[in-house]
Amino acid sequence: MVTPDTSPLLALSDYTIRFATPDGTVKAVSGLDLTVARGETVAVVGESGSGKSQTFNGVFGLLAGNAETGGQALFEGRDLLTLKPSQLDAVRGDDMAMVFQDPMTALNPAMKIKHQLSETLTVHKGLKRRAAEAEALNMLKKVGIPEAERRIEQYPHELSGGMRQRIVIAMALLCRPKLIVADEPTTALDVTIQAQILDLFRDLTADAGTALVLITHDLGVVAGIADKVVVMYAGRIVEEAPVDALFAKPAMPYTAALIRSIPRVDRDAEAVEPIGGRPPDLVNPPAGCPFHPRCHFAEDKCRQERPLLEAVGPGRRAACWFPYVDAGVTHHQTEPASA
Amino acid sequence: MPETLLSVENLSTVFALRGRSLFSKSVELKAVSDVSFNLDEGETLGIVGESGCGKSTLGRSILRLIEPTGGRIVWQGRNLAELSNGEMRKARRDLSIIFQDPVASLDPRMNVGQIIAEPLKVAEPSLGRRDRRRRVETVMEEVGLAPEMINRYPHEFSGGQAQRIGIARAIVTEPKLIVCDEPVSALDVSIQAQIVNLLKALKERMGLTLIFISHDLSVVRLVSDRILVLYLGRIVEIGPRREVFQNPGHPYTKALLSAAPIPDPAIARSREKTALKGDPPSPINPPSGCAFRTRCPIARDVCAEELPPLAEVGAAHRAACLFSQEVRSEPALQG
């Protein structure tokens, strides 16, 4: 047993991303405070445009040219936002890796799988070609690629979508990173392949103690794999909680609404409850709580003052003037009259 | 008794693919093989299966957007497969389709009004401009789009709104049957719910019959009365929703159910790992006997020998598995 290192692996504080556009400044991410512990699986959930992907694109230095970042993004104590490109290159791929929704965009179509995978090791770990290829083959077997010896000689277009995503995951794992960020890694895949990929993530993170950030719009997908869930809305965290607590008692109406909008395969139901309206414009976000125009429980205070993200229970934070709390009245639990 | 609206008999769609070299023979890809089912008026049939199982090809073959290569599509006493192009065009006002990618399925150079009016021009050419516009405005309101948006262009809309335009276009001719081909798969979960509820409401109001194609079993459970499960172009199971979800007769259906995510941490963690390994085999060279046997957890030698018939396992419930009793001896899902 090694003494556990309890310092966070990744700590974002007052982290902000702005994009300058002809229509004005897009406030994509605002004042984010978020930590990822070593070995922890964190799900970051939100609708399109909530800033969930941009947050981690920024961490990896992958933002568009018109972006401006603020605050801090500490990875093992080093601020990624102030690193030189060459220093950031050393961290990316080596200590942290990213898996995207569309595996085709992450793979070079003109390179054999063998070369794409071994390149990572020759560049980051200084391995010789032979050794790197052997290691690559091992990793392909580990991520469950059948006939790995044959597949490694193929090009990406010869593989199915599920297999390509496994290759990308293998590539991300090769340098034994401390953090993997997976942005909608199963959204483009069939449910059967999605289940296989989630099983794979669960095993790999448990074996290697890798921290995993799963970015998704589908809260249902992460129920079985996440330790902690972070819900984002309009560029801010609106709720954070351990996964069981979040599903059992969402503290913020938006989280409750997200949960209610998921259809269930294990139940007969005649309707789901959608979230009315649309996410706000991030050039001119509404005053007060950003969710208030879509919230069934909004009161005057919600329209005027923005609630801060505050502790509402053990390991739980919520940005809501009227959060659900164990002892208090639970007005989010009561079904709203009509959608 | 509701009336049978559509009866699909032994429908097959085969694509001829070019061989690897100029001189080699062309290869046949059987996308849909020997599919038969009836559809009652007012019912919703969910079609599920993985990518490449032929579910979209089946939906499009029924509407002859892809020409089927065999079988009959009996619609109001006539075989659609035999209609001339002119007759088919007339029949199309009753038959409509909604596509998966809402933005890509709308012509970017046409405004919303033109997009929605397009099928009306074909179906009711005698309709005057003003009447046509009134019809367009009416359906816009029905799908939850403000009629003021009639002159806007597709790029100005979000995915959910674009899908509403697609639905408006599909219902403007007041069809009887709509094939919905993965209509919510490209949308955020929160928006999916809006579109699903809209489709259900329209179905009730207009007395529509729907074929709802999706790889997402939870959405299919929500909207369908009956479920049809396809594997490599063949029906492996068909039956009432409740039966198929609670007591499936085919191991493939069971495997699909075990892979669908459940938004409850305790249940999700306690589930066993998905039994289904790998991808479906190539439809160009399908396995002998039961096509699912290469991924089936209970396959025996006999499964390689014969194609299992689609046999009765319950009331109006059929499955193509020699061991369906064994499959049905354990429940598929908790709850």
Image: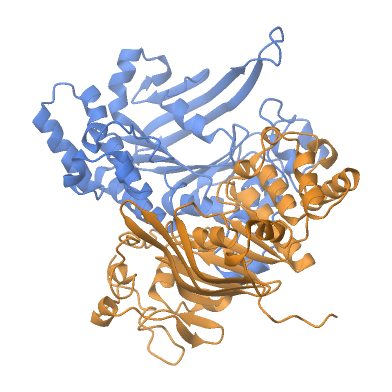
Chain colours: A orange, B blue
Q: Residue at x 47, y 75 (%)?
A: A239
A280 sits to left or right of A66: left
Q: At which x and y percent is residue A71?
A: 51, 72
Where, quadrant-wise, is the C terminus of chain A in this rendering? bottom left
Looking at the image, residue A163 lies above or below residue B108: below
Determine if residue A24 is in view.
yes
Q: At which x and y percent is residue A245?
A: 54, 79
Quadrant for residue A124, please give it: bottom right
Quadrant for residue B41, please give it: top left
Looking at the image, residue A264 lies above or below residue B309: below
Determine if residue A217 is in view.
no
B138 sits to left or right of B155: left
Q: Nearer the viewer, residue A289 or A276?
A: A289
Q: At which x and y percent is residue A215?
A: 55, 60
Q: Which of A305 and A208 is in front in this view?
A: A305
Looking at the image, residue B264 lies above or below residue B60: below
Q: Which residue is drawn at 80% across and 35% down?
A: A153
Quadrant for residue B98, please give it: top left
Q: Which of A269 and A103 is in front in this view?
A: A103
Where, quadrant-wise, is the N terminus of chain A in this rendering? bottom right
Q: At which x and y percent is residue B185?
A: 47, 47
